[in-house]
Each structure stands twice: as C-alpha cells, then as structure tokens.
Image (cartoon, rainbow, N blue to C red):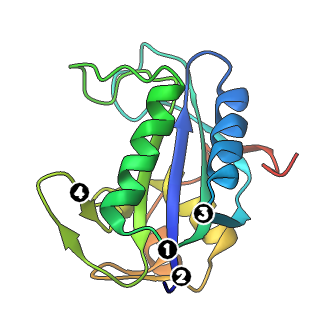
C-alpha cells in the first residue's frame, strides 16, 4: 500500500494541555500505520468561541500513513476519546483534546462525517502558523498556499511556548 502525507491539528485547553498534546503525539507515533514526520511548536492562544474558558494550546503534525481518510479519522476520534474528550453541545467549548484532519494529500473529501481540507483552515491562525512552521510550501487543495492564507491572519497574540519535540 502506498503512503499518504496528511496534516493533523491538535488542540487542548483542559487537564494539563501540554501533557494532553504530548500524549496525543505519542499515540499517533505509536500507531503501526502512522509515521510522524514533523511536529510544530506548541502555541498558546485565546479560545476561538466562548471566552470564559482557559487559553488553548495548539500544534500541527505532519504524518505519513497508509490509512484511508475515513480510517485515519476514526483513529483520531479514538485518540480523542481515550483522552477523555466529551462531545458537548457547546460549539467551540473547552476540551481535553481536539484532533482535526486538516489535509489529506491533495484530496478534497466531502462526506457526512468528514470534510477535508478542514473548512476552517483559512480563518484559523492557530492552525496556519504551526502549519507554516512545518510545511511552509504546502498548497492546500481548493484554498491556496499556507503562506498566502497566513498573510490574511493576525498572529501577534500567538505565543510559542514549546518546540513540541520534548
């Protein structure tokens, strides 16, 4: 089976977010059909939705996998669930772990369960800045280059707190 490059966004703002992100990275790296190729720094940023919650830590990881997009999505949901992710009614609410399949090779996927590239990418500096750190030349299908998208986002409030590697 051939290998595919994918990018996964990670976020957490509950129960020791840095520990949650590191544990999620370990879970991805230990999966037999996933190889972690690059990890961004961890970035602290305010929540996107309701402000009465802790700041988030966000990162992006580049992986190689022979899993199909739906299979990979299922792995990500399984990792979220293993980290105590509660699917709540409140959109953009606090969470122990959020894993988003951002990009899956050059594919454009729209199913009932999955939309790739992730439709929120152009509006999310907390995705674009770490993505630009590890894949500055990436062109996102149907959206354009990461660098061009990042030019349209404010990132002054984002703070890199860790290199993600440790």
- Other-residue count near label 3 (Cα within 10 Å), few / some / many at <14 / 14–19 / ≥20: many
**Which residue in the structure is indicated by mark 3?**
34
Quadrant in the picture for residue 130: bottom right
Per the model, the C-alpha gap separating discs 4 and 1 is 18 Å
Quadrant in the picture for residue 58: top right
Observer-nearest residue: 45 or 58? 58
Per the model, the C-alpha gap separating discs 1 and 3 is 7 Å
Residue 23 coordinates in the image, percent (x, y)? 69, 35
Q: Earlier in the sequence, mark 1 or mark 2?
A: 2
**Which residue in the structure is indicated by mark 1?**
66
Q: Is residue 104 left or right of residue 20?
A: left
Q: Earlier in the sequence, mark 1 or mark 3?
A: 3
Indicate the quadrant containing the C terminus: top left, top right, bottom left or bottom right: top right
Secondary structure beneath disc 4? loop
Secondary structure beneath disc 2? loop
- State yes or no: discs 4 and 1 in contact (Cβ < 8 Å): no
**Which residue in the structure is indicated by mark 2?**
3
Q: Is residue 44 left or right of residue 51?
A: right
Quadrant in the picture for residue 69: bottom left
Residue 114 vertical placement versus 84 (above, below): below
- State yes or no: discs 1 and 2 in contact (Cβ < 8 Å): yes
Secondary structure beneath disc 1? loop
**Which residue in the structure is indicated by mark 4?**
114
Identify the residue at horizontal 33%, vertical 30% (top origin).
92
Identify the residue at horizontal 30%, vertical 23% (top origin).
87
Identify the residue at horizontal 22%, vertical 71% (top origin).
109
Identify the residue at horizontal 42%, vertical 13% (top origin).
52
Residue 66 vertical placement versus 19 (above, below): below
Q: Earlier in the sequence, mark 3 or mark 2?
A: 2
């Amino acid at each position: 089976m051939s290998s595919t490059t994918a990018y996964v966004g990670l976020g957490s703002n509950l129960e020791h977010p840095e520990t949650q992100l590191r544990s999620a990275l370990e879970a991805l790296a230990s999966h037999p059909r996933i190889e972690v190729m690059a990890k961004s720094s961890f970035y602290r940023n305010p929540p996107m939705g309701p402000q009465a919650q802790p700041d988030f830590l966000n990162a992006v990881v580049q992986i190689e996998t022979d899993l199909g997009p739906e299979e990979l999505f299922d792995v990500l949901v399984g990792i979220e669930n293993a980290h105590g992710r509660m699917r709540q009614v409140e959109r953009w609410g606090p969470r122990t772990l959020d894993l988003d399949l951002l990009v899956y090779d050059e594919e454009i996927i729209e199913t009932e369960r999955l939309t790739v590239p992730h439709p929120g990418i152009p509006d999310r500096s907390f995705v674009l800045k770490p993505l630009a750190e590890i894949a500055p030349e990436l062109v996102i299908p149907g959206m354009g280059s990461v660098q061009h998208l990042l030019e349209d986002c404010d990132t002054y409030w984002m703070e890199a707190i860790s290199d993600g590697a440790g």
